[in-house]
């Protein structure tokens, strides 16, 4: 199974927007997830999705809804929610460039994403940005909306790709 992007948007530098997909590059120690196991046989506990009226429900039969009064729901389509996001919520906005050694790694949060071009239209500008940063030994200081909050991030070339590191 191919990894799914955790970010889909743009690397924006002034008037240039490069379409990218972002993939989580590392997992912070705070994100260790434990599974529930049956203590006698160490098998993972499974939960069934159950409707009180119809019994067991398949995942593709489940929708999201907002309860506006007791037992009354408005069905929310995930694609509609995506359309409502502001354009700035989908962009990593590069504010400027600094020397690659100007940021103390002490400020790196440990949460990293690798960016790849999203489609053929993004390939050339992505390569140009990456190659220019490598040639000049620069990294980008940027802001991004992640999990609904604005974060300061560092965009830098790593192993032939562009990586985004959240700053603390």
Image: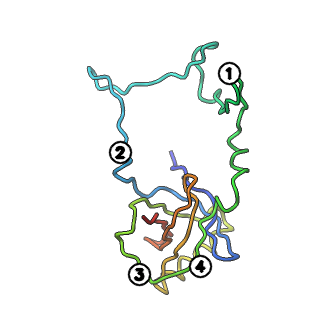
Q: Which residue is mark 4?
A: 128
Residue for point 47% across, 24% down? 47
Helix, strand or loop under label 3:
loop
The reply to whether dot 4 and dot 2 touch (C-beta < 8 Å) is no
Relative to 141, does residue 72 appear above or below in the rendering?
Answer: above
Relative to 72, does residue 119 appear above or below in the rendering?
Answer: below
The reply to whether dot 1 and dot 2 touch (C-beta < 8 Å) is no
**Which residue is farthest left?**
40
Q: Which residue is mark 2?
A: 32
The disc placed on residue 71 is: 1
Q: CA distance from mark 2 to mark 3?
A: 31 Å
Q: Which residue is mark 3?
A: 102
Precedes in sequence: disc 2 or disc 3: 2
48 sits to left or right of 73: left
Q: CA distance from mark 1 to mark 3?
A: 55 Å
**Which residue is farthest bottom?**
136
């Amino acid at each position: 199974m191919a990894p799914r992007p955790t970010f889909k948007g743009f690397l924006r530098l002034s008037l240039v927007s490069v379409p990218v997909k972002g993939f989580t590059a590392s997992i912070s120690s705070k994100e260790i997830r434990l599974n529930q196991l049956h203590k006698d046989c160490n098998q993972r506990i499974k939960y069934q999705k159950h409707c009180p009226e119809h019994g067991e429900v398949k995942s593709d039969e489940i929708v999201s809804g907002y309860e506006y009064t007791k037992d009354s729901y408005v069905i929310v389509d995930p694609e509609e929610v995506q359309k409502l996001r502001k354009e700035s919520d989908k962009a990593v906005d590069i504010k400027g460039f600094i020397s690659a050694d100007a940021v103390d790694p002490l400020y790196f949060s440990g949460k990293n994403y690798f960016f790849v071009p999203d489609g053929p239209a993004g390939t050339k500008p992505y390569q140009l940005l990456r190659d220019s940063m490598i040639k000049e030994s620069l990294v980008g200081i940027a802001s991004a909306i992640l999990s609904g909050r604005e974060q300061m991030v560092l965009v830098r070339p790593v192993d032939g790709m562009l990586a985004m590191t959240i700053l603390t």
